[in-house]
C-alpha cells in the first residue's frame, strides 16, 4: 500500500511506544502517534495530557491540549498544577513525547523565538510544558519533519534541554530524566550516540537516500555503521491511522497538523 | 460573600487601569465574555497573566488594554500563531508589550505560592534552558536538606482573577468541573475574583470533593451563558474548533481584526450571547 512521508513518520513514532508505558503527550504530531500506538499494538498505553486528563482514550485527535473528550474518556482528570507537580516532577512518567520548531545535534529544542529574543523575526508559542517534560520524563521521544530550517547547527534559543553540550551534560547539571532517546522524522530515525550523545542516523525510511537526510540536516550528520531501513507501514497501521484522521477531520472540519 | 452582579458592573468596579489581571481557563472555560467587557470598557495598562494566552488575550492585546504579559505558551491551539500577540511583540502594535515568560510548571508553582501565601514557588525546572537568561525573576535556591539546586519563582498574586464556571447558586458558591486548569489556584491567589457562569441555580448540590469556590472567596458572580465560547463549557457546549481556525484569518491583518472587533465586540452589550451568534457547534459536550 502506498504511504506518505508523514504517514511513515507517524507510524514509526507510534511503534516506539511500548504497551503499558505511561506517556506524557504533546499536542499535534506526538498526540497523533501516541493515539495510533494505543489503537494498534499498545492498548494499555497510558496517555497523560498537560491539561489534566490521565489515561485519556479519545476517539478523535484533540485539536487543543484540553479538548473535552480527553477529560470524558480519562481514568481521572486532575488540576494542571497537580499534573506538573505530582505526576511529572514526581517521576511517574516513562516517556515524554514532544514536537519542536528547531532541534540541534544534541536534541536540544527551541520553541520560543527565531532570531533575537527581544526583537524576534518569528515569535513562537514558547515553552508550555516542554522544559520540565524534557527534564523529568524517564526518556523523551521527539517527532518533527526534517528540513534545513528545523535541524539546525545552532538554536536561536534553548527552550528545552536534550543532551545539552553532549556527553554526561544532563548528569552534570542535575537533570533526573534520561533525556531524548529517539528523534523520529519523515526521513528516518536519529538516536543519540551512546557516549557523545550526538544524534546519529540509525534508521532510514524506505526509498530515502542518506544524502537526502544529510541535505536536510544543518550539521554534519553521522550515520550508524549498521543503518537499518525502517519497515514500511503495514496495511493495518495505515488503515487505523487513516481512519483516525478521517474521524478527526469530520469532527473538527480539518485534520490537525 | 459574592455579589450577583451584571458583568458590566463587576468589571467597572473590580478591574482598574494598571491592574494585574489573570483570566484563567486551560483551553476549557476560557472567560471570553468577561474579556470582551474589559475591552469594551477601555481598560488600560493591564498586566495580563495567563498560562496559555489564547484568542481572548490576542483580542485584548490587539485592542491595546495591556502593556505586559506573563505567560508560558502563547498560540492558537492546533492552528498556529496568535497574530495580534506576535504583532505586539515583533512590531509593538498597537502598543509595546513587555513579556515575562515562564514554563507551565513554573507558572503553576507561582500561582500555588500565591494561593499558599508563600513568597515564591519552587520546582525542579528551567535547568539548562535559556529562559532564566531572559526572565531574571527565575532564580535558583539550594535545598537546605539535600543541597540540590532548585528553581525559585516569585508568587503570582493578581489584583483580579477572572474565570468562567458552569454553575453558581444564589448565594454565589461556584461549581467547576472537567478540565479545571489552574482556576482554583488563580482565584485563591488573587485579591478580587470575578466568576462568570453558565447558569445560576437554587442549589448546587455538588458531589463530594467537587471543585467548589465558596461564595466568601469570590467578589462577584455574573450570569453569562455562552460566556466561554468559542472555548467550551463541559456539560453545556463543545469547543468551536472551526471558530479557532477562522480566527487565524480574521486576526492576520490589523484592519480586518479591528473591523471584526468593532462589529462583534465593541458594538454589542455584555448581554449578547456570543455563542448563539457564531457557534457552528450544536452538540452538547
Image: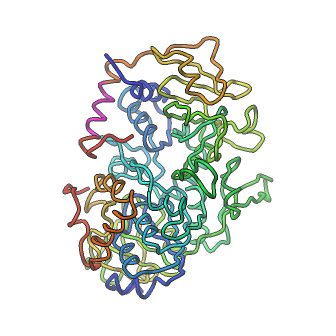
User: Image height check: is B10 above or below B147?
Assistant: below
Q: Is residue B15 left or right of residue B141?
A: left
* Residue farthest along the top direction in this orientation: A226
- Number of numbered discs on residues: 0
The color scheme shown is: rainbow
Q: Residue at x 44, y 47 (%)?
A: A54
| Quadrant in which residue B213 is drawn | bottom left
Q: Is residue A76 visible?
A: no
Q: Residue at x 41, y 71 (%)?
A: B163
Q: Residue at x 64, y 27 (%)?
A: A199
A229 or B223: nearer the eye?
A229
Q: Is residue A245 magenta?
A: yes
Which x, y percent locates residue B24?
Answer: 45, 66
User: Image height check: is A43 above or below B214?
Assistant: above
Q: Is residue B280 visible?
A: yes
B265 or B280: nearer the eye?
B265
* Residue farthest along the front direction in this orientation: B255
Q: Is residue B25 magenta?
A: no
| Quadrant in which residue B112 is drawn | bottom right
Q: Is residue A180 left or right of residue A253?
A: right
Which x, y percent locates residue B275?
Answer: 25, 65
Which x, y percent locates residue A122?
Answer: 54, 50
Which x, y percent locates residue A236?
Answer: 32, 21
B276 or B45: nearer the eye?
B45
Report the span colored magenta. A239-248
**Quadrant containing the C terminus of chain B in the rendered view:** bottom left
| Quadrant in which residue A156 is drawn | top right
Q: Residue at x 69, y 56 (%)?
A: B132
The secondary structure making up most of the magenta span is helix
User: Image height check: is B216 above or below B89?
Assistant: below
**Quadrant containing the N terminus of chain B in the rendered view:** bottom left
Amino acid at each position: 500500500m502506498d504511504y506518505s512521508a508523514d504517514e511513515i513518520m507517524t507510524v514509526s513514532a507510534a511503534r516506539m511506544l511500548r504497551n503499558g508505558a505511561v506517556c506524557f503527550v504533546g499536542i499535534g504530531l506526538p498526540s497523533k502517534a501516541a493515539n495510533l500506538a494505543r489503537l494498534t499494538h499498545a492498548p494499555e498505553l497510558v496517555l497523560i495530557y498537560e491539561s489534566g486528563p490521565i489515561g485519556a482514550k479519545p476517539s478523535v485527535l484533540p485539536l487543543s491540549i484540553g479538548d473535552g473528550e480527553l477529560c470524558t474518556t480519562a481514568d481521572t482528570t486532575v488540576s494542571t498544577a497537580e499534573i506538573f507537580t505530582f505526576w511529572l516532577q514526581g517521576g511517574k512518567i516513562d516517556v515524554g513525547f514532544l514536537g519542536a520548531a528547531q532541534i540541534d545535534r544534541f536534541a536540544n529544542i527551541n520553541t520560543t523565538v527565531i532570531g533575537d529574543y527581544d526583537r524576534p523575526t518569528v515569535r513562537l508559542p514558547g515553552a508550555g510544558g516542554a522544559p520540565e517534560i524534557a527534564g523529568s520524563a524517564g526518556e523523551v521521544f521527539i517527532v518533527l519533519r526534517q528540513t534545513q530550517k528545523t535541524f539546525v547547527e545552532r538554536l536561536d534559543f534553548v527552550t528545552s534541554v536534550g543532551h545539552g553540550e553532549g556527553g554526561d551534560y544532563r548528569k552534570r547539571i542535575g537533570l533526573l530524566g534520561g533525556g531524548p532517546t529517539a528523534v523520529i522524522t519523515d526521513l528516518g530515525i536519529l538516536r543519540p550516540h551512546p557516549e557523545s550523545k550526538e544524534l546519529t542516523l540509525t534508521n532510514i525510511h524506505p526509498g530515502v537516500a542518506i544524502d537526502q537526510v544529510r541535505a536536510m540536516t544543518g550539521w554534519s550528520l553521522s550515520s550508524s555503521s549498521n543503518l537499518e531501513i525502517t519497515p514500511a507501514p503495514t496495511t493495518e497501521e495505515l488503515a487505523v491511522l487513516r481512519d483516525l484522521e478521517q474521524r478527526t477531520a469530520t469532527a473538527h472540519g480539518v485534520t490537525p497538523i | 460573600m459574592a455579589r450577583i452582579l451584571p458583568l458590566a458592573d463587576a468589571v467597572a468596579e473590580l478591574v482598574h487601569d494598571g491592574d494585574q489581571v489573570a483570566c484563567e481557563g486551560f483551553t476549557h472555560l476560557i472567560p471570553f465574555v468577561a474579556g470582551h467587557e474589559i475591552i469594551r470598557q477601555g481598560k488600560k495598562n493591564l498586566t495580563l497573566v495567563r498560562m496559555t494566552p489564547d484568542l481572548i488575550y490576542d483580542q485584548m492585546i490587539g485592542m491595546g488594554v495591556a502593556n505586559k504579559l506573563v505567560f508560558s505558551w502563547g498560540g492558537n491551539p492546533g492552528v498556529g500563531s496568535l497574530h495580534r500577540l506576535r504583532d505586539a511583540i515583533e512590531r509593538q502594535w498597537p502598543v509595546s508589550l513587555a513579556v515575562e515568560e515562564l514554563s507551565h510548571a513554573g507558572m503553576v508553582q507561582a500561582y500555588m505560592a500565591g494561593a499558599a501565601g508563600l513568597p515564591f514557588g519552587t520546582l525542579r525546572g528551567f535547568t539548562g534552558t535559556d529562559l532564566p537568561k531572559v526572565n531574571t525573576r527565575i532564580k535558583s535556591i539550594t535545598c537546605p536538606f539535600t543541597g540540590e539546586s532548585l528553581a525559585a519563582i516569585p508568587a503570582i498574586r493578581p489584583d483580579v482573577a477572572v474565570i468562567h464556571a458552569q454553575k453558581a447558586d444564589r448565594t454565589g458558591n461556584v461549581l467547576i468541573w472537567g478540565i479545571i486548569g489552574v482556576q482554583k489556584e488563580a482565584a485563591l491567589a488573587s485579591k478580587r475574583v470575578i466568576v462568570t457562569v453558565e447558569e445560576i441555580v437554587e442549589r448546587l448540590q455538588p458531589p463530594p470533593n467537587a471543585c467548589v469556590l465558596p461564595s466568601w472567596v469570590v467578589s462577584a458572580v455574573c450570569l453569562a451563558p455562552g460566556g466561554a465560547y468559542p472555548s467550551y463549557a463541559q456539560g453545556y457546549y463543545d469547543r468551536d474548533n472551526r471558530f479557532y481556525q477562522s480566527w487565524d484569518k480574521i486576526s492576520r491583518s490589523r484592519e480586518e481584526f479591528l473591523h471584526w472587533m468593532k462589529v462583534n465586540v465593541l458594538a454589542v452589550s455584555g448581554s449578547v450571547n456570543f455563542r448563539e451568534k457564531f457557534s457552528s457547534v450544536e452538540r452538547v459536550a
